[in-house]
Image (tube, rainbow, N blue to C red):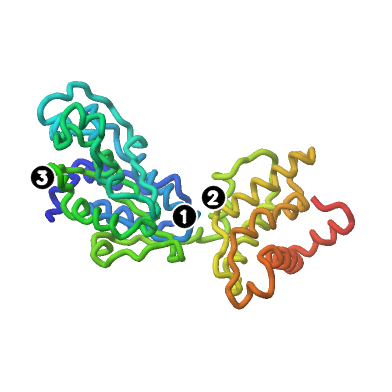
Amino acid sequence: MDNKNIKPKIRNSLAEIFRSRDDIFTDILGQETAKKQIKSALLMNRHIVIFGQPGIGKTTIAKNIAKLLPEITVNDCEFKCDPANPVCPACRSGKTKSQLIIKGEQRFVRIQGSPDLSAEDLIGDIDPIKAMEYGPLSIEAFTPGKIFKANNSVLFFDELNRCPEKLQNALLQVLEEGRATIGSYDVDIETNFIFVGTMNPVDINTERLSDVLLDRFDVVYMTYPETNQIEKDVMVSKGCNMVETPELIKEIIVGFIRELREEESLEKVPSVRATIGLYERAQANAYLNGNDVVSYPDLKDVVVSVLAHRIKLKPSVKYLKEPRELIEQEFDRFIQDKYPDIVNDEEQGGCR
């Protein structure tokens, strides 16, 4: 494969942006190492898989890549052909007359990995109605799948390691050659996209990716927010802000979540979504209680509801206690250790 000839327009657009601005991934706070890795991979037209725990912004940064792309003019066809370099049969034969302008955020095509996803979803299939009109083996009867609809765009494959092996094999040619062979027609159709996939850590619902498929990617690793301050900024910027939340309450939320991630008895720990959940639900409690400021009881009342189902106990622990028990005990211990004055205030009926 000659990388120099693949996606030149997309790469050139990104190269100019990377050189002119330092922090281009403004939708994600922190993650500086991952951002640098993504930029260098994109400059060389590398396919990327972003690996990390759920809820750390993998999808957000993929959408951010698409938003960086400039608006372009394409043919008004299912393949979004470049007028100067059409790839689909209709555009090559001159049947497509109209054009349209698509913005960067519209140049984002998503595939959600799941066991029931089929190769037809990716490549395409015969449209019965078109087959009756044009004939079952006519190229005009072919309806393109997601990889063709992502032409001149970003193809985002969320949770790549949840798709079956047959689907993995369907990706091999298009990732290597930038084209797919439509078997029934003995026709190769080019497609020009940036591929960004994500992978969550292995669990019982994930599939093993073949070495042949993995060899076509560079893997970028994303972590939880690097510092308490970054996670607090993410929480406030991404969460709903209904009533005032004191800095102390914000510190408790972020500090407790980050301490839970270090808890040795947990096999699965809460993500940033849990941080945002505590922040939003505490505000909701304050609002329902007729208050304009979040108090400690508003937060305490929702800790189990937000967190208990988001953790998983290690086998050595789960037969001794329930997740909700652990959350209650750890939260009480955390407050006693780090914020004893709050407990004293609450006992006196004056905690806010």
- Tell which circle, 1 or 2, labels the residue nearer the N-terminal end: 1
Pick whichever, 210 or 23, lies toward us: 210
Write down the residue under mark 3.
186
Q: Can residue 34 be seen in the rendering of this structure?
A: no
Residue corresponding to mark 1 = 30
Position of 204 with respect to 45 (left or right) is: right
Q: Look at label 3 and name its amino acid.
A: Asp
Type of amino acid at the residue the image marks with label 1 = Gly
- The residue labelled by disc 2 is 234
State the image quarter where residue 94 is shown.
Answer: top left
Residue at image location 17% in from the left, 21% down from the top: 97
Amino acid type, callout 2:
Val
First along the sequence among labels 3 and 1: 1
Instruction: Assign the N terminus to one quadrant of the image.
Output: bottom left
Cα distance, mark 2 to mark 3? 50 Å
How many numbered marks appear? Answer: 3
Q: Is residue 146 above or below residue 132?
A: below
- Whether residue 129 is visible to the viewer of this picture, yes or no, is yes
Residue 326: image x %, image y %?
A: 69, 67
Which numbered mark, 2 or 3, is in the foreground of this view? Answer: 3
Q: Which element carries disc 1, helix, strand or loop?
A: loop
Q: Are marks 3 and 1 in contact (CB under 8 Å)?
A: no
Image coordinates of residue 147 in percent, x first then y, are 26, 44
Pointer 1 local density, CA inside 10 Å: few below 14, some 14–19, many at least 20: many
Tags 1 and 2 in contact by the CB under 8 Å rule? yes
Disc assigned to residue 223: none
